[in-house]
Image (cartoon, helix red, strand yellow):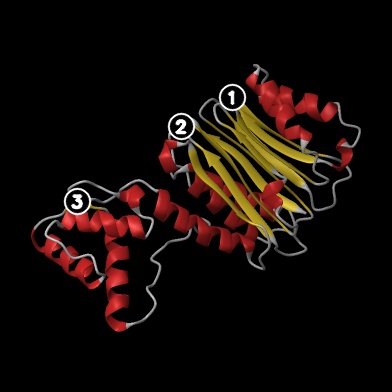
Amino acid sequence: MTFSIAARDGNACGVAVASKFLAVGSVVPRVRQGVGAVATQSHARVAYLDEVLDAAGQGATVTEALHAAVSGDDGRALRQVGAVGPGGAATFTGDECSPWAGGVAHGDERSAYAIQGNILTGPEVVDAMERAWLGNAGQRLDERLLATLLAGDAAGGDSRGRQSAAIVAHAPRAGYDASGVLADLRVDDHPDATHELARIHALSTLFFGEPEGVQPLRGALREEVSAHLGRLGHEGPDTGAALEAWMSGVNLENRHAPGGIDARVLDELRAAAHSKRDGSPAPRRTTSAAPLE
C-alpha cells in the first residue's frame, strides 16, 4: 500500500514515501543524522526503525542490521522495509506482501538507496523511481528524493490511489537555524498528495533556503527595490534596513544577504508590489520538483 525510497548521499540521508493510507509520514520514515535512514511499510513494524538504526549506529552494516531486525520478527512475511547506512543499502519484501511488491537496493561509501513498494500498479513504479534517483545525481538530497517519489507516482504508484506523502531529509548544519533538517514535510490527507507535497516543499525551500543569486543593492536595482518597498509601506532612507524589515514580515529572513538581495527574494518583492498596485493576489513564485524521464 506504499512506495518509498530511503537514501544517503554523502553526509545527507533521508526518506520519501507516498501511500493510499492516512498520514503515512507518521509511520514509515525515520532518519538519524550520521547513521542512516529507514522506511518500514506493509503491515509496518515501527520497531524496525530504531532496531535498524541502533544496530547501524553500533557498527553493524546496514545489511546485518536489517537482517537481524527481520529475523527476529514472526510477522516478517507481511513486512517490507528498506534502509541505508554506512557503506550500503538493503531492502526486504516478505513473501506474503500484497502484489505487486518488491524493491531494489544499491550503495557504497558515497551514496546508497533502497527503493521498495507494495500494492503497486507493477514493477514499473520501482523502475521509474530508480531511474529518477540516478538521473538526478548532483541535486540536493531532498530535491532528489522528491523527484524520485514523483516519478513513482507518475508511473502508477499505489494501485488503490493517493492519500498521503512525506519527506524527511537531514544534512549537517542544513535548514532553519542550521538544525540539520533539509526537509521534514507531510501531507496527511489529500487527493493528489505527492504533488501537494511538492508544492509545500517548494515553499519550504523558499522560506528556509540559503541566499542564492545575490545581487548588490545599488544603482538601478536599489532604486527599483526602494520603489517596491515604498509601495508596500516600507519607505525609508536605508533601503537595506527597509528590505530586511519587509523580509522579516513575510518570513523570508533566512534569505537575508547584507548589502544585496537574493534572487528569489527579488521575485517575491516584485510580485508583492505588482499585486499591491493592481489589487490582484500576489502569485507565489515557487517551483516543484519534476520526475526525470
Q: Secondary structure at mark 1?
A: loop
Q: CA distance from mark 3 to mark 2?
A: 26 Å
Q: Pointer 2: what residue?
A: 172
The residue at 57%/58% (across/down) is 197
Q: Pointer 3: what residue?
A: 260
Q: Is residue 119 rendered to the left or right of residue 169?
A: right
Q: Out of 210 and 276, give the one closest to the viewer.
A: 276
Q: CA distance from mark 1 to mark 2?
A: 15 Å
The residue at 63%/32% (across/down) is 84
Q: Amino acid type of disc 3?
A: Gly
Q: Is residue 113 rendered to the left or right of residue 288?
A: right
Q: Secondary structure at mark 3?
A: strand
Indicate whether 45 appears above or below 101. above
Total marks in image:
3
**Earlier sequence position, callout 1 versus callout 2:** 1
Q: Pointer 1: what residue?
A: 86
Q: Residues within 10 Å of mark 3 (few under 14, many from 20)?
A: some
Indicate whether 242 appears above or below 102. below
